[in-house]
Amino acid sequence: MSSKDALDDAPAPVFDPEAADTIKSFVRRKGRMTIAQRDALELEWSRFCLEWPSPMGQAASQFERAQPLVMEIGFGNGEALAAAAARDPERNYLGVEVHLPGVGHLLHVLSSRQISNARILCADAVAVLKSGIEPGSLDEVRLYFPDPWPKTKQKKRRIVQPAFVEWVASRLRLGGRFHLATDWEPYARWMRKLIDGSSVFANVGDVSGFVPRPQGRIETHFERRGLKLGHGVWDLMYLRTEVPANTALQRPRDPFQV
């Protein structure tokens, strides 16, 4: 997939202020819950989960130690987050997920592996970015294999939209990283065209605009499923650059406000 051709056939998404607060990028599904997941939700919730909605103040204060903070949005069953937190004890990890079975699975893993530098919010990630994260306080934001909403009429439900990118940018520190991965090629082109057009993100990929899977990102359940279906995998990495002169980082415009 050449850089130019891949981007030319991807229509640029347009921010729709009337839909931004009402359209959700996820559907809450009950899902099947194992006994271990149910027990973990009951026994470990108070230890690892942060209550929402309630003001968190500085998110770093919710951890045992004040360290750089990584936020993973939609962590699924939490395997990537748990592996990263265990391997990287010098940073704190905040996972945001709406599906309780996945939360229960991650709680079980964190407890059994005695991982102490991770916390969980069972909430809408957009709401968390807007109301729960201080400007410039995140070291990295990760978004791995979000729902691609592949049908044309569903594209407005994708989480990667102009407003979402603005909020990620305002919450990252200067020099912080935004790492995305998808196994759906049209969504990879969509992500790249949208974020490459941002004035505060620099794409650090090669000539294609993508990067090889970083050593620190394990192969996830959703990734393995996509590979079995014959999908490719695309990783994108961006650095948060300087703030444009006309942008007030401490008081970001609320692009979700109708």
Image (tube, rainbow, N blue to C red):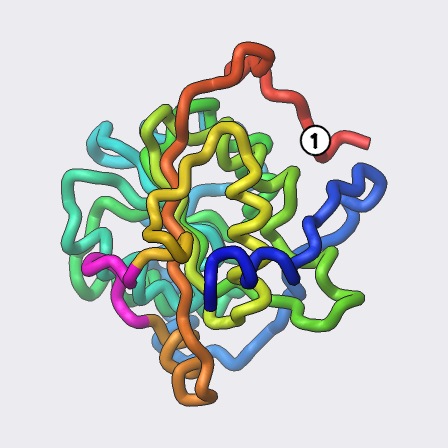
The answer to if 253 sits in the magenta stretch is no
The percent coordinates of residue 185 (x first, y second) are 53, 69
Quadrant in which the C terminus is drawn: top right
User: Which residue is more in the foreground, 106 or 168?
Assistant: 168
What residue appears at the point 47 percent right and 68 percent down from the top-left corner?
1
User: Which residue is more in the foreground, 14 or 41?
Assistant: 14
The answer to if 217 sits in the magenta stretch is yes
Query: How many badges with numbers are in the image?
Result: 1
**Type of the residue with mark 1:** Pro
User: Which residue is more in the foreground, 8 or 114?
Assistant: 8
Q: Can residue 71 be spotted in the picture?
A: no
What residue appears at the point 53 percent right and 71 percent down from the top-left corner?
184
Please name the residue that numbered disc 1 is placed on. 255
| Image: 241 above or below 76 | above
User: Which residue is more in the foreground, 186 or 30?
Assistant: 186
What residue appears at the point 40 percent right and 82 percent down from the top-left corner?
227
Query: What range is drawn magenta here?
Result: 212-219
Name the quadrant containing residue 152: bottom right
The percent coordinates of residue 90 (x first, y second) are 15, 39
| Image: 48 above or below 38 | above
| Image: 90 above or below 108 | above
Name the quadrant containing residue 240: top left
The percent coordinates of residue 77 (x first, y second) are 40, 68
* Disc 1 element: loop
Q: Main secondary structure of the magenta part?
A: loop
The percent coordinates of residue 182 (x first, y second) are 46, 65
Farthest residue, direction right: 18
Query: Dot 1: few (<14), some (14–19), or many (≥20) neighbours within 10 Å?
Result: some
Q: Can residue 10 be spotted in the picture?
A: yes
What residue appears at the point 57 percent right and 15 percent down from the top-left corner?
247
